[in-house]
Amino acid sequence: MLVVRAIHEGDLDGLFDLASQVGTGMTTLKPDMKMLGDRLATACASFAETIPPEERDYLFVMEDTANHRLAGVCAIKGAVGLTEPFYNYRIGTLVHSSRELNVFTKMETLYLSNDLTGSSELCSLFLHPDYRVGHNGKLLSKSRFLFIAQFPHLFTEKIIAEMRGYQADDGSSPFYEGLGRHFFKMDFHHVDDLTALGKKSFIAELMPRQPLYIAYLPQDAQDVVGAVHKSTAPARRLLEQEGLHYEGYVDIFDAGPVLQARVSELRALRDSELAVIAPDDDMVHACAPANTEPTLVSNTTLRDFRMIITEAVNVNGSIDLSSAEQKLLHCGTGATVRTLPLNVKKNQ
Amino acid sequence: MLVVRAIHEGDLDGLFDLASQVGTGMTTLKPDMKMLGDRLATACASFAETIPPEERDYLFVMEDTANHRLAGVCAIKGAVGLTEPFYNYRIGTLVHSSRELNVFTKMETLYLSNDLTGSSELCSLFLHPDYRVGHNGKLLSKSRFLFIAQFPHLFTEKIIAEMRGYQADDGSSPFYEGLGRHFFKMDFHHVDDLTALGKKSFIAELMPRQPLYIAYLPQDAQDVVGAVHKSTAPARRLLEQEGLHYEGYVDIFDAGPVLQARVSELRALRDSELAVIAPDDDMVHACAPANTEPTLVSNTTLRDFRMIITEAVNVNGSIDLSSAEQKLLHCGTGATVRTLPLNVKKNQ
Amino acid sequence: MYVVRPVETADIPALESLAAVTIPGLHTLPRSRDKIVMAVERSLASMAAQVDIPSEESYLFVLESVEERRICGTAAIFASAGSNGTYFSFRNDVIQQVSRDLNICHSVHALTLCSELTAYSHLSSFYVAPEVQKGPEAALLSRSRLLYAAQHPRRFGDRFFVPLAGVTDDDGQSPFWNAVGRKFFKMDFLDAERVIGGARNRTLIVELMPHYPVYVPLLPGDAQAAMGQIHPSGELAFNLLTAEGFEADEYIDIFDGGPILQAHKHALRTFTSSQKLRVRTGVARTREGPLFNYAVSNDDSAAFRAVAIPCPDLEGCDAVALSPEIQDILRVAEGDSVTCVRI
Amino acid sequence: MYVVRPVETADIPALESLAAVTIPGLHTLPRSRDKIVMAVERSLASMAAQVDIPSEESYLFVLESVEERRICGTAAIFASAGSNGTYFSFRNDVIQQVSRDLNICHSVHALTLCSELTAYSHLSSFYVAPEVQKGPEAALLSRSRLLYAAQHPRRFGDRFFVPLAGVTDDDGQSPFWNAVGRKFFKMDFLDAERVIGGARNRTLIVELMPHYPVYVPLLPGDAQAAMGQIHPSGELAFNLLTAEGFEADEYIDIFDGGPILQAHKHALRTFTSSQKLRVRTGVARTREGPLFNYAVSNDDSAAFRAVAIPCPDLEGCDAVALSPEIQDILRVAEGDSVTCVRI
């Protein structure tokens, strides 16, 4: 069975194996023992609450309890941009209008910004190809929302997720070729690697500072502003179901969209509920409604946060979990858990 | 009794009387027969749907049915900025950081923008002083949300409301004195009047185009960015309860905040429900729960939209309205109405 | 023999025929009779005005064949480019890009909408009929405006500029306009020039043109190539002006990207090298040395006249020999003072 | 008698004592022995180098009393201000504000961080001991660098600039810094100058300084007043440089708002008015006319020497009379060529 749980000190090798599967395109998860070890240490300190909330990096792994193999990973960073500037382009609107000529021109404009400084970030989502079946992807991605719903005080007002931007079949980024290359004079992947290494001062040195009219970019660059990489489209839909929106912020290199939400407006904060694990008797089984939708359930412990997907249902604050499920959550009858329907209810 | 209703052709004199009470500070409601007459004509065409949605201006009046006097007015504009540019300052963040010096400076910056172009706007809210009691203010302001919930297809993705900015006791605007005056070289109220008259090309001619660091403004100007006029604070709270947020857009002259929301995230869209007016028999009375909170109820007719506040409650899609209330809403038993609790439920 | 003199009311019909032969899209001369009349009247009023600070005055000069009394060229000068608004141009900015970490060092060009030319005096409307383009008359015409300005410093700014028409194709399309202005104006180059009447000081420019720099590398190749390029019809003017001391490169036109030449008057040969000399009656003789073309003007502010004559080097002289005919054309007599500058 | 010559290794102790008396916050001279040694070595290497394109060379000159063999002044010139980065300054932009509807017309000043001075040659480290500030030696010292530059055009840019220290109060506070730089650097002016070592070409400047124009009317009055104002210690240099042809007003320093004087070499008197003359043995005689101070340098690129002498007007001459003593100091002999320019 699969459980998503807070990462442990002992997970470094498993994490490295996962990172080795990632390939290019995810700058925060590279198979580098030193980087991963540092990140693991930060994650453990985060769950132990020994570092301040804005420095935390909550790293979750999906474990296959049948073979103790790590099947996936995902993370929430407490705050971005507090040690190195966090850059985005923000898309704004400028209207150029002349009554005399009866011309009214609405122009989209890119502003280099650090507006998202201090936001919490959903990142580093990766599911091993062997496990890309059923609800596993949803379980892994949505586990983070249940965590946020359980510990909302740990997160700032805003939560964001950077989506990988559109790439052509040959791996090139039309947005980078149309804009960044003129200023950086180097390859897209090289630039991407430099930022992954935290070498960001070159952005301040080389990026054009002045707002840019999008209409000046080549058409193929204009077309991909805010568009995701085709492999990222499902991840984007999942996050949008949870209440994140594209609000006009994009990556400065590939123009991939940033999804964002106020923490208080996430579906998980609105719709998740607490429940007590019911004693395992027939009465509860009998009263349980016929299950229609799977439910996410987590325990309520920060340090040992664990989450599973179940067919049980929260009925008036009580949920009937099997003993195997209770074991996965590290809690037993009478314990309080948090539940959230896996899928979004269709609106009226 | 009080009813909020779509404005009619015959309301011009009443509207003029109301506008005469407004005083300075509301540029969209001046006691000018020509302006008000034009606006009334647009409003009637809006409810009659004879002009396109983005040109509409839905004007509502609160009528005291006891004496047929107009007690208040409020409006929703279909879209702003489509004939004249709609300017705001947007507050962004720029981080200036040097690792070498270990300096990390987060600076707030004002960007002249037309980002809100095309948004629907809540505006022109005015309640006659004689009626500033009880729930009247809430009824008037919130009526618009019930209208939007009933006709969401008429509104664009975003809805905004401009709040009057902070003024000192002598009526001066510290923000204008600290910024605008250097570029316009004229009185704040003069500038405000010019914009009310639609003479906005001077903004393009005279406003500084380049982003401005807020830290360069005098302290008293910095202090009032996003602050409302003290008489506007209650109106702001009402709108915030309905799901509008200050997202960093302010007025270019007085730095009053713009509140905004996605239409789909308004409380009224989430929490309002349809109900059928129950036959007036004892069974319904007997089953109705003890009332705790007043409810807003509207009919569902665009052309003759009417709304009241009631003590009746929507119970499983049925509501028990008195015959007087039914008369105010221009509908009878078996008709469908839309209901919304007046006040926001306290969150779990 | 040709003379340059201020325009007169009687010249209006001749100017109308000249306007008919100039090229569409090039604002050398006003096109309609009404506008020509206005330009002539404004010039007459400007010449007659007492001026303390340069303002709305505009001075129009014509090149006339003395024998045939035929107008075969025009040249004008506006006292202050921004007298009725702000004169907009694109400034050519160079942004240094240096990253020591990455060992990158290059520069990026950006065009910034600016109003720096507003207080300059503005040379315009330079037209020379084909038959005199080869001779010294073209230089005489171009320079006479500056001779007039040098004699009347209070009527003009300390700096001068001249916009030259940029390149367009046979259909009147401007590649620079298509890449820049069209995105804001949403109309063809010739339509835009027509609605704006060739002006660069109108409110609608600040309403419509880009507020933020245009980064040159983002422009299509043909638009980049058109920056600072002159329309073939402007080559003669360009050569005359650069020889005079004007410099290109710093500013270009916001519509067609054509070059705007500009200079401080201290950098212009007419200001730095002209001499005031006494008239003596005589003719230039080759035994005084090789002959050069000189522009010679009277110092009569009410009836300015200038001619080009061959003449030995006047360096160090205090008088210039003029034939009685020339003296007649210039309306001067022996002993009067004239201003001379080598063409 | 004083001579200006390139610095030598033996001058290091003397430079150390000079550095001890200069004023904190004014980057006239390096302060530590190590830095002085570096500066001297760099100058020696630069003088000896074959230069095709101006780069990291820097040339340091000293003013020496010939009799006492005492150093009483320094002056330097960097071949290229941006040789190891981008040289940042504030450009003084004027934005025209015109609204015909409202009948408003005024201009607003804005300071824009720019890198335009990067390719200029940069004059610096000008210091003259109090006892020689009154005489022609100060002018000789300031100008000698330019004489050297005029003799070696390939070693320098076409344009030159000189930043002069801005105003600070008795506590070392700079009103301009407090209104601008402090908001980004979050430190005192003297601390900032110390960490940056007086440089204006460091990456941290583009990281920290404002990316967008500073609108001058928004600055506090004392900061506005400090813009372009010189520290009292810079008055002598300011007067010498403006007399030379340098212009202020266009650029100011990004830290203290002090003026940056700049000019194209064609506008500098040393370049435009210096003459190459033959040496003849003799002394200036008053019967040849009134005497003027002239700076005279040899044309020996390996051992540059310059002195100031009183001399009749040399306009139109082809030789200059120098006493055997002066010839000795300049290391020239009768018939050699020297460069002379009136001070």
Image (cartoon, coloured by chain):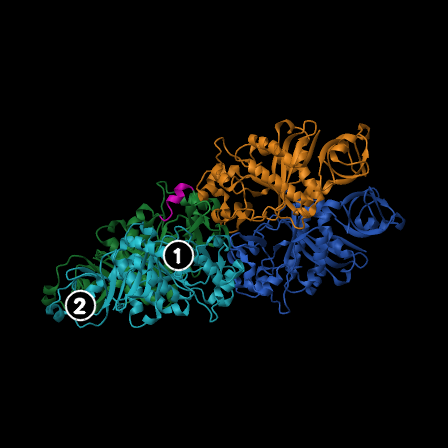
Chain colours: A cyan, B green, C blue, D orange
Identify the image quadrant of residue A298: bottom left
- Which chain's residue wears label 1? A
Instruction: Report the residue marked by disc 2.
Output: A322
Disc 1: CA contacts within 10 A as few (<14), some (14-19) or many (>=20): few
Q: Could you say which is closer to the camera, residue B160 or residue B348?
A: B348
Residue B223 falls within the magenta-colored stretch: yes
Q: Which of marks 1 and 2 is nearer the N terminus?
A: 1
Q: Residue furthest right?
A: C287
Residue D171 falls within the magenta-colored stretch: no
Element type where label 2 sits in the image = loop
Q: Which residue is drawn at 35% across and 69% down?
A: A234
Disc 2: CA contacts within 10 A as few (<14), some (14-19) or many (>=20): some
Instruction: Report the residue marked by disc 1.
Output: A34
Task: Say left or right for C159 vs D185.
Answer: right
Of tags 1 and 2, the one toward the viewer is: 1
User: Which label number is shown at residue D49?
Assistant: none
Write the start and end of the magenta stretch as one range. Answer: B218-226
Calculate the distance from the C-alpha at mark 1 to the C-alpha at mark 2. Answer: 40 Å
Q: Could you say which is closer to the camera, residue C142 or residue D142?
A: D142
Element type where label 1 sits in the image = helix
Residue C104, percent from left and from top: 55, 55
Residue C203, percent from left and from top: 53, 54
